[in-house]
Amino acid sequence: AYDQVKNKLEIGYEYLGEHSVKNISEPVHVYRVLMEPEAAGKVIGEKRKEKRRMTLAAVIVLLIGVGGLAGWYLYIEQTKRIEPASVEKMAFPLPEKPSIAVLPFDNLSGDPEQDYIADGFTENIITGLSQVPEMFVIARNSVFTYKGKPVKIKQVSEELGVKYVLEGSIQKAGDQLRVTAQLIDALKGHHLWAERYDRELKDLFKLQDEITIKILSTLQTKLVTGGDDITWWRTDSFEAWGHNVKGWNYFDQYTKQDNLKAREHYEQAIKLDPDYGAAWELLAWTHLADVWLRSSDSPRESIKKALEIAKKTSERWGKDGLHFFMTEIYLFQRQFEKAIAEGKKAVALSPNSSRYHIGLAAALNRGARSEEAIVHAKKAMRLEPYYPAWFLGNVLVLAYDQTGRYEEALEINKKLLKRALKGEYPLKNAYRRLALSYARLDRMEEARSHAAESLKIDPNFSLERWRKSRLWMFKDQKWLDNVVEMMRKAGL
């Protein structure tokens, strides 16, 4: 109303500011009418309004101009207020060497389809750090349980048993990237450093290395790798890298369908960059997985195909991943000592790989060296605090049984049953393993009870068929025969 009459009436006005008025959602400008003749045509207080507008505008311009600096500074000041973790509340003893969990980087692009960029960026930093013997690095699968969850640094530190936590975010806009990263000392509750990087997409891989080296430098640790180690999993093709990341996400699901999808992505990655060593290695693994998943029409041909790819890759790059791959190949061929030797080489080159430690433990079990298997199984479980149930059921409990530690095997099998009841492990197998444990301890009533539960789920189970399917797996045939006898006594 004021705008309509301000120049049409011989009166003055005093600006009283903005006020909320009933039934009007936005505040309105309020003026008091001045009837005095000397006030005619004047507006008192209007300059205050204009000054306020100019001040606000100046502040906005200033914030935009220095937002990258001032906003970042304010963010850092805010994030310094971190509740310290407690050593006494750690779920695991704190390692003597520098220990770290790299939390999944947040995808800030607003497009869920770009999650793989943040995931792959996180995984590559974990891979780089994991190659350092002087570091203790929590495995990928455990840190990814926190993905998308609002967790406190204190919680992560105490649940995983680490001193340091890296967190960050990544945002892709066209060919531009903005990455933030913060390294936190969880015990002291403050940042060791926090950085923001504005880079071109083509510099993504260099930035991964830069952040990895900055972490190691801060923790006074050196990155020591073989000459071909970095080029092994490096590519200059962002698209090829994307296919490799997506391929792993499928491969890690461990199903027939996902294994085929993983292979398609690895093949696409190789088409885009024939020199991409990591994609070649993982392609070989998909053919071997066809045998494990029983999706191969000819297991012999699948192993042959996998071996051809692996040998070709090894001749060119010579990588620890191939040592681990050859562990599996030698186990198929019942060359147990060669399998163990390759597994030990893999662990020596990647001492923070839970995958390599549990693989070596399995090879040691099958090669009748179960005391050593227990050591590596426990290392794998420490590196992977949220380890899959099969670490227990397929590896650790077998090692305890082979070494005659039946009470410990029973306790592990009880834990296994709880996880099986949650759908994390085949329930029929969990009952079967408990039946064996109780039979070992001559607790036959409980043994028969659990055997009966297993047979309810799998009424067509044949102990003889089970024995034949495992004859090739184990070096110690006497132990296997004894297992079969105990299972028979339990009623299986």
Image (tube, rainbow, N blue to C red):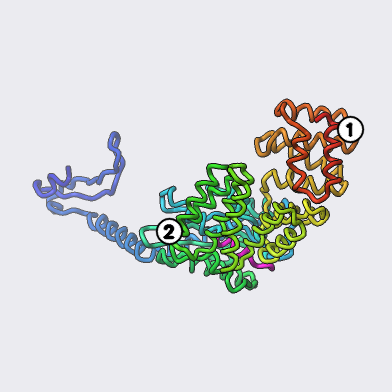
- 231 or 475, which is in the foreground? 475
Q: Residue furthest right?
A: 442
128 drawn magenta: yes
Residue 239: mark = 2
* Mark 2: few/some/many CA within 10 Å (<14, 14-19, 20+): some
Residue 258 image position (x, y, % from top left): 53, 44
Q: Where is residue 479 in the image (x, y as percent from the top left)?
A: 85, 45
The residue under the point 60% across, 65% down is: 314
User: Does the magenta segment cover residue 273?
Assistant: no
Seen from the viewer's position, the closer of residues 60 and 434 is 434
Asked where in the image residue 315 lies, by quadrant, the reply is bottom right
Q: Which of 96 and 4 is in front in this view?
A: 96
Q: Which mark is residue 443?
A: 1
- Calculate the distance from the C-alpha at mark 2 to the C-alpha at mark 1: 59 Å
What residue type is disc 2 on?
A: Glu
Whole-percent x, y for residue 151 in the image: 58, 49
Locate residue 178: give its quadrant: bottom left
Q: Main secondary structure of the magenta part?
A: helix
Q: Is mark 2 on a helix, strand or loop?
A: helix
5 with respect to 103 (left or right): left
Q: Which residue: 69% across, 68% down?
A: 134
Spot occupied by residue 297 in the image (x, y as percentages of width and height): 58, 43
Q: Is residue 134 in sight in this rendering?
A: yes
Is residue 382 among what the camera can see?
A: no
Highlighted range, magenta? 124-134
Which sits in the foreground, 112 or 192?
Answer: 112
Q: In this view, does 31 lie to the left or right of 258?
A: left
Sequence-first disc among 2 and 1:
2
Residue at x 88%, y 30% (from the top left corner)? 444
- What amino acid is labelled 1 in the image? Arg
